[in-house]
Structures are given as structure tokens and as C-alpha cells.
Image (cartoon, rainbow, N blue to C red):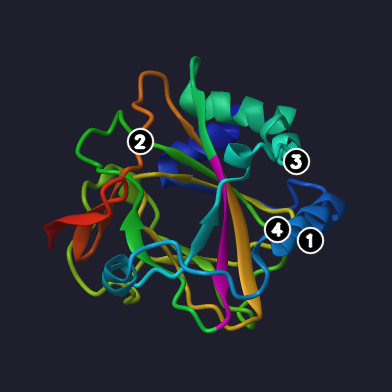
Amino acid sequence: MDVKKYAEEFWEKGFLHLPGFFDANMMDTLNTLILKHYGMKPAWEHTNEFIAKSATEVVPWFPFREGNNVFEVIEQDRRLLNLTKAILGDGWEKLYFMAMFSKKGTRGQAWHQDCPPEDQQQFNLNRLFYTHDITEETGGQTIVFPATHRGGAIPSGHPHEDLEGQVVLSPKRGDLIILHGHLWHRVLPVQGEYRISANSRAIPKDTPEDITDIAVYRNMRYKFSTKEVIEER
């Protein structure tokens, strides 16, 4: 695995899509475990205001905070560790791990940046993996806008509109997608029975642990710790 080449590609585009990175059988096991946790109709954890304004309908789960370490096999994957170091440099740190579930018929996730982009040295790294296929039929594809990790705040506008230059990613079971936290990205509405992804977030050295507390949407900035809109856009 040429991690230097992948790191260069990441910094040029702001994302990587590596098909078949993780073992398919392991993904089947983790998919079953995640579904067992959620069931098919989990309750929302965000406020109604956030769901309405962000056009984002995702239920997060933080298994390590509950003492469930089954996903350690992902976080300790030597190839993932080497690739993360090539991208972030020495001294990088794990931030947190979360699974994400979306119900059938939900809107996915609106255009956003995971953290404020004004300081380009302060950001999070999304290391996303997929335990089942995401296709045009299931919906829930990931949309990215290449190179926008260098472009400042996403312009205000409609939360879910198509943008010229966007790229549609349809990850399959076992795929790895790495996204810069400043990259503009969204998730399409879910048409299948459910959509699952999981995110092992990391940060460069000297990045505050609350870097993702404020997310930037096209119509607002939202602070998760206080559950409030801190800027209308």
C-alpha cells in the first residue's frame, strides 16, 4: 500500500475512496451487531429544531463510551494507522468512534462541514467504513465536492441542492472513505430499509478535542454541546 501516494491524493481532493479495504465477512458481523443495537426504528437523539433546520436525520451511537470495544479491530488496523499518519503526520490522535443509522424514507444529511474552516490547521479527519452496500437503489450515497477543504465556509443556500462539480460516491461493503472535516459533503435520502456507516474520527496534533462541536451548514452554524443554532446563514 503506497500511503504516500494516497496521502497526496487526499490533500489534492480532500477525500479518498478505497474499495474493499476491510474484510467482507467482518463487515457482515459488524452490520449484524449494529442492527442489534439500533433495531429498525431507533428514536431520534437530536432536537426537532436541529432536524428541521439541518435536514439531517441520523441516529448516532458511541459504542466505546459504553465499554463496547468490538470495533477496536477497525481502529487498530495497521494499514489504517499507517495511512492516517501519512495524512495527518506524527502526533495525530484518535478523536471518537461513532456508528450512524438512518431509517428508510429519511433525508440523509444536508451539505455541511464538520467543523469551522477558518483555521485550515484545525480540522477533523473522517475515516468512514461501510458494513453493507450503498447503491442508487438503496439511496444514502455520499456526495462530496472535491477540493473544497481549501475553500473556506460553504456558501449559504439550500441544504440539499445539487451543486455543479459534486461527486457521488456509492461505497460497497468493506469500503473505506476518508474525508477532510472542512470538505463540503452530504448524504442522499435513504430509500432502502436502512443505511449504516461508521466513523473513526481522528485529529492532527494540537487540535482541540471539541473541534467537531460546531458544524457549518448552508443555513446555520450549530453547536452540539449546547444544542443551539449559534449563527443563522
Amino acid bearing label 4 = Ile
Depth check, mark 1 against mark 2: the one in front is: 1
Range shown magenta: 97-104
| Label 3 SS | loop
User: Is the C-beta separation of discs 2 and 3 under 8 Å?
Assistant: no
- Residue 24 image position (x, y, % from top left): 83, 55
Tell me if 231 is positioned left or right of 198 in this view.
left
Q: Residue at 60% across / 52% down in the picture?
A: 198
| Label 1 SS | helix
Amino acid bearing label 3 = Val
- Is residue 146 highlighted in magenta? no
The residues tagged by marks 2 and 4 sit, at their Cα atoms, a distance apart of 27 Å
Query: Pointer 4: residues within 10 angstroms few (<14), some, or many (20+)?
Result: many
* Label of residue 70 in the image: 3
Tell me if 153 is positioned left or right of 90 in this view.
left
- Residue 35 image position (x, y, % from top left): 71, 64
Q: In which quarter of the image is residue 119?
A: top left
The outermost residue toward the top is 90
The residue at which mark 4 appears reads as: 34
Amino acid bearing label 1 = Thr
- Residue 159 image position (x, y, % from top left): 29, 71
| Label 4 SS | helix
Q: Residue at 73% across / 32% down in the picture?
A: 77
Quadrant occupied by the N terminus: top right
The outermost residue toward the left is 232
Q: In this view, does 95 lie above or below 48?
A: above
Depth check, mark 2 against mark 3: the one in front is: 3
Depth check, mark 2 against mark 4: the one in front is: 4
User: Is the C-beta separation of discs 4 and 1 under 8 Å?
Assistant: yes
Query: Pointer 1: residues within 10 angstroms few (<14), some, or many (20+)?
Result: few
The residue at which mark 2 appears reads as: 123
The residue at which mark 1 appears reads as: 32
